[in-house]
Amino acid sequence: MEILMVINPVSGNQDKAFLVRKLRHFLEPKDTLELYKTNGQNDKEQIANLLQKNNFDRILVAGGDGSIKMLAECLQNPETPATPIAILPAGSANGLASDLNLPQTPETFLKVALGNKTRTIDAININNELGLHISDFGLNAELIKEFTNSSIRGKLGYALNSIPTLIQNEGPYPFTIKTKEKKFTRQAIMIALANSKKFGTGAIVNPDGKIDDGIFELLIFKKLDVLEILKTLNEEAEMSKDFVEIIPLKEVKISTPKPVSFQIDGEYCEDLTNVSAKIVPKILEVYVP
């Protein structure tokens, strides 16, 4: 078996060298392993080149949601062989791994990564980028923007950066939303395009979300409400309709008069005024328990 392992060395707190040693322990003598460490310099092009020049049987990704997004985009090149991926949850945000019920300890998730069971999941095409998990305008994107510039990684980094972000937040923002059926406006502190249930922190923001059902949910968070935010930590708690409006869709266009922070799968993009989104069904094959 030929394996490519893509490692994001700066994501999360997981010891990547330990992961590699553990992986080698599981491999058979006839298996081959090629390592690629991301460095932020033309990673997508270099990985795509590796995939086109080799015939890997599977790809392992040791990183967070952003690393998985990048690899999924590499695999969409028509010259790149369709190859299933295995997720090793090793990022600051691992929401996709959580939605797929992947185990959290190296020994158990490596067994899944080298197993035979797969699931083919959807993505959202967002301004010609892929979003596999949750993308959003507003408060959460502002938090991620601050976290990107912080030296503290992991959930502690998110927690510490949340304080100034909450204080300085300028929302609610005015949004115009256009679907196939109608056009309407909303004031919101955050608007999310959700292909799954949870943020990388584990907060459940889209209780009905399913990653392979051919639709995504538009989540319109109308106000900042601490009690409602606490409900996201309990899968059985139902959020108030005064706090969040949930609309299932296959495509949508969102605009706002002034640029607002936007993120895709835990990676800050830029401040935007327009986003177009459309579901892309059954686009990526991943290993699952």
Image (tube, rainbow, N blue to C red):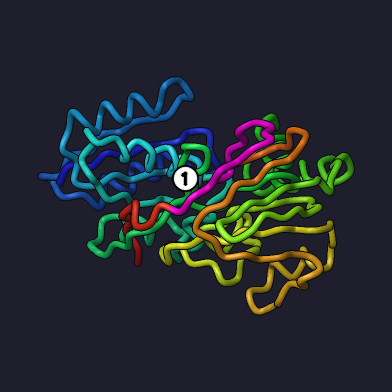
Residue 65 in the figure: left or right of residue 235: left
Q: Residues within 10 Å of mark 1 (few under 14, many from 20)?
A: some
Residue 48 x %, y %: 30, 30
Instruction: Name above or below for residue 212 compared with residue 94.
Output: below
- Report the residue at 79% width, 65% height from top: 243
Q: Residue furthest right?
A: 167
Q: Is residue 189 magenta?
A: no
> Mostly what secondary structure, the magenta segment?
strand
- Residue 271 colored magenta? yes
116, 45: nearer the viewer: 45
Residue 227 position, x and y percent, is 83, 68
Q: Hey, what amino acid is under mark 1?
A: Asn
What residue sits right under mark 1 in the picture?
Answer: 125
Residue sitting at x 31%, y 60%: 111
| Residue placed most toward the observer, 126 or 231 | 126
Q: Give SS at disc 1.
A: strand
**Horizontal side of residue 269 vs 172, given as left or right:** left
Residue name at image x 81 percent, y 68 percent:
242
In percent of width and height, residue 31 lies at 15, 44
67 vs 19, nearest the viewer: 67
Is residue 120 placed above or below 141 in the rendered structure? below
- The answer to whether residue 95 is left or right of residue 254 is left
Q: Quadrant of residue 115?
A: bottom left
Q: Which residues are magenta?
A: 264-279
Instruction: Give percent across and percent down for residue 96.
Output: 49, 55
